Image: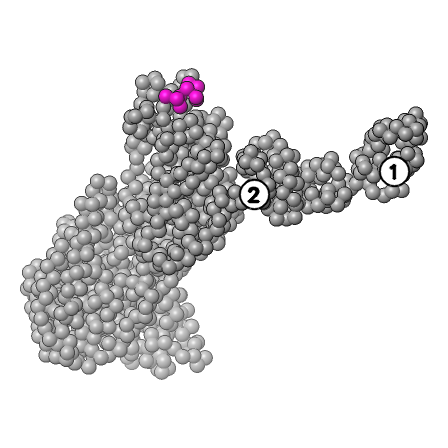
Amino acid sequence: MTDLTKLTAVEIAGLVAGGETSAVEVTQAHLDRIAAVDDRVHAFLHVDTEGALAAARAVDERRAAGEELGPLAGVPVAVKDVLTTKGVPTTVGSKILEGWRPPYDSTIVQRLRAAGTVMLGKTNMDEFAMGSSTEYSAYGPTRNPWDLDRIPGGSGGGSSAALAAYEAPLAIGSDTGGSIRQPGAVTGTVGAKPTYGGTSRYGLVAFSSSLDTPGPCARTVLDAALLHAAIGGHDPRDSTSIPAPVPDVVAAAKLGATGDLTGVRLGVVTEFSGEGAEPGVVAAFRESVDALAKLGAEIVEVSCPHFRYALPAYYLIAPSECSSNLARFDGVRFGLREGDDGNRSLEEVMSLTRDAGFGPEVKRRIMLGTYALSSGYYDAYYGQAQKVRTLITRDFTAAFERVDALISPTTPFVAFPIGARTSDPYQMYLADLFTIPTNLYGGPGISVPCGLSEGLPVGLQVMAPTMADDRMYRVAAALESAVGTFTPPAL
Amino acid sequence: MTTTLPAYDEVVARYEPVIGLETHVELGTNTKMFCGCPTDFGGEPNTRVCPVCLGLPGSLPVANKAAIEATIRIGLALNCSIADWCRFARKNYFYPDMPKNYQISQYDEPLCVDGYLDVEVNGELVRIGVERVHLEEDTGKTLHVGGATGRIHGATESLVDYNRAGIPLVEIVTKPVPGTGALAPEVARAYVAELRDVIRSLGVSDVRMEEGSLRCDVNTSLNLPGEEWGTRTETKNVNSLRSVERAVRSEILRQASVLDGGGRITQETRHFQEDTGDTRPGRSKETATDYRYFPEPDLVPLAPDAAWVAELKAALPELPRLHRRRLQADWGLSDADMQSVLNAGAVELIEATVAAGATPAAARKWWLGELSRRANEAGIELADVGATPGQVAELQSLVDAGKLNDKLARTVLEGVVGGEGSPTEIMTNRGLEVVSDTGALTAAVDEAIAANPAIADKVRSGKVAAAGALVGAVMKTTRGQADAKTVRDLILERLGA
């Protein structure tokens, strides 16, 4: 019998729709897989067995009643613990929200339910999505299914590891500086950051409001496109949501899969194609560029001189916004409350709560941001960073006058050993060196597996203009058709 | 400190006051500023809340278009320029009645800037510059339980009600107002009164100071003639028009006393004390909180369409000041009479009473007479005296129909104010209607004639004036419920005079 956990979302949906298997069988197979491997991988913070089976039964009943099912009906999905799920614990990887059961569903989760997907549970992440390795989760690190001693990337390492470990065929992530794409790259899976405003942030626990973008994770480009189409589009509850339909990413992925990129101009970002990346990563990237050229793409070098300032600008903007966004975690209305023994003042209880509830990286960023927004420093830090953001946007705009999409390695290095970079924050921050510019600009970016370096996956990033998400899916699917998918060793 | 305060006239002869006012107005929109929760007053604590106004993780604000429109209309009525592009900003500080621990407000990019409001003080027009009008969200309300005074000190626990959190709040900030001299307190009061009337005429808020839908902070400083403006203080907790005037006056006296003693004024927030009429220090602004303002990333910039703004401008109602001029002419009042109507806060009440059918004279008589007397006695605003314009008009119609005489009408009004119902109901329930049953009256008249034969003879003999004593006797037996003229006619008829 077919191992249901090894199938793509497209295949699963086809089998369910055709009555060859049931959504309950598919769901049970994935729950069994989670039970078998997740004590080693630790991709999940919470598995919603009953909710998943109930959702699966509902799909089977709808099919039995002859209802038309959507293209992802009956397909299990793992959701990063940054999105609110009504009645289901949502921790954002932090002690400060331990045990919190939100009274409402995020828009993304609502749309997942409406699409007939089956939510398996909530995946591990760096606390408040701050990190690149999932080691900053308050609930312990997730391990990379390619090598359990290595990190699965972050902040959405749980979602990507769940895919690579065949615990789920689809997952949701959120990308503020690379948190979907970098975990995708180091786990050999696909991760797409949609155009900012193309997917709703309502119910996404905010880290940095002007950068946070929820998006799809999958093992194939087409699966990612289907998930993107299901969750994307305007949401009146998010005023930064773009009031326009999502570009036809599914059609673009199918077009790309034909392996023809004739007439497509791709720009290799000079600044990101050699310096700062591991040789193995550079080699895999160069081979992929050749493969893209063979598919008919025209390859040109494009310099984006301000991209080198993206990392420092990001580490002013994101912490600034987070210092304000995380102020609400004070123990007054929800989550952890520490030291409320009847003898302490409100201010003491707030301080004790925040001290006990936040981990060291979160505290570091709150302090950075508080400082950057302070009177007298605002112009030099936050204000200056906003100017850099404008310059980076201009780099993108100028580049897209010459090329249809930009390409680079997704991340400078393959999955590193757990513990290797936790002692030096800057070494950790470098993991997002190539992904951050896209967030500052607001355009879409996708990481697609492009090869191996010393047995570990390497990702190629495709960056497209805002609201041209379809272009990156076409290029990514074409590359996938040329280099294939990558399977980790059996767990 | 027990320094004796100098005399006001003497102080304002030596010092020049500069005042400034910051007014917050809660808009009467159906829903809150950034979510769909209802805004109506009252309701059990924490029943008008949702993930957005509770600031739950993941929730996002969406700006209320009606609130933006109302703010633009206020700005236009105050002769402001409307920004063609502006943003909300976050004002960051920790306080439990603020769900997100930041307030969504506006900072250096307000919606309306640079306007003015003309106010009348003693018949003269004073132009008050308006610096800015911006939009923000209100906070919740903290109750300290267990303490003696309801204050945080000594309280065993604090309870927070978020029903009000997120209600749209418009802040109107004046430019500094120098040059008003001794009239500074009156100017401050007149400005707030005029602002209140303007906003009420726009129909965007009920602007009730006592319910907190209009709140006012008063800035005051003193300087010697020819010298630079002094350090200002900000007085909060100013909850009535009368308090605005008293707060400025008391702050002028206090600052003069400090300056006369060689001291310096501390830039600080002070609280007006309703009972004593003076101000007490609050938190010092010299160690001001750093609010770390930055543009609100959860909201897109506001860019009001010029055509829309022009449309709103064209549809503005008549300014209250001009409206009053028209009423004065319609009602045929002298300037002095109009002034007493204004002072009593009776313009709109009389207008509404006239609209309900009463003559201007009658409406003015009730509101400036009996009802003003009651409001003064109770120390409340005339509008809160307990009678509505409709009831007053109804009362007058009963008088006009001869069903009530003046004395009875006052008794009925007492019932109206006491909440007993409509004038007609009270008249009927209490049996206060003028006795018009001629049979019953005739009996009372005959009784009075029989009891006073000497007087009756005088009347018979042609001394008609003597009938007054008989009328009085009849009125006494009918407990005032007879119409005096009818009684008199009856007496004269019975006595053949």
Observer-nearest residue: B220 or B267?
Answer: B220
Q: Residue at x 48, y 39 (%)?
A: B193
Return the x and y of residue A137 as percentages of the image width and height: 25, 54
Amino acid at dot 1: Leu
Return the x and y of residue A261 as percentages of the image width and height: 15, 78
Observer-nearest residue: B340 or A125?
Answer: B340
Whether marks 2 and 1 lie on the same chain: yes
Residue B171 lies in quadrant: top left
| Residue B163 on the magenta span | no
Return the x and y of residue B275 as percentages of the image width and height: 50, 27
The answer to whether A378 is drawn above or below residue A305 in the figure is: above
Q: Which residues are magenta?
A: B5-14
Amino acid at dot 2: Ala
Q: Chain of mark 2?
A: B
Inter-mark Cα distance, 2 to 1? 43 Å
The answer to whether A237 is drawn above or below residue A26 in the figure is: above
Q: How is the image coloured?
A: one colour
Q: Residue at x 56, y 41 (%)?
A: B328
- Neighbor class of circle 2 (other Cα within 10 Å; few <14, some 14-19, many 20+) is few
| Residue B13 on the magenta span | yes
Is residue B204 visible in the rendered structure shown here?
Answer: yes
**Sequence-first disc among 2 and 1:** 2
Return the x and y of residue B200 as percentages of the image width and height: 49, 46
Quarter of the image with the N terminus of chain A is bottom left
Magenta stretch secondary structure, dominant: helix
The answer to whether B99 is drawn above or below residue B271 in the figure is: below
> What residue is disc 1 on?
B490
Which mark, residue B329? 2
Side of A324 relative to A397 (left or right): right
Q: Chain of mark 1?
A: B
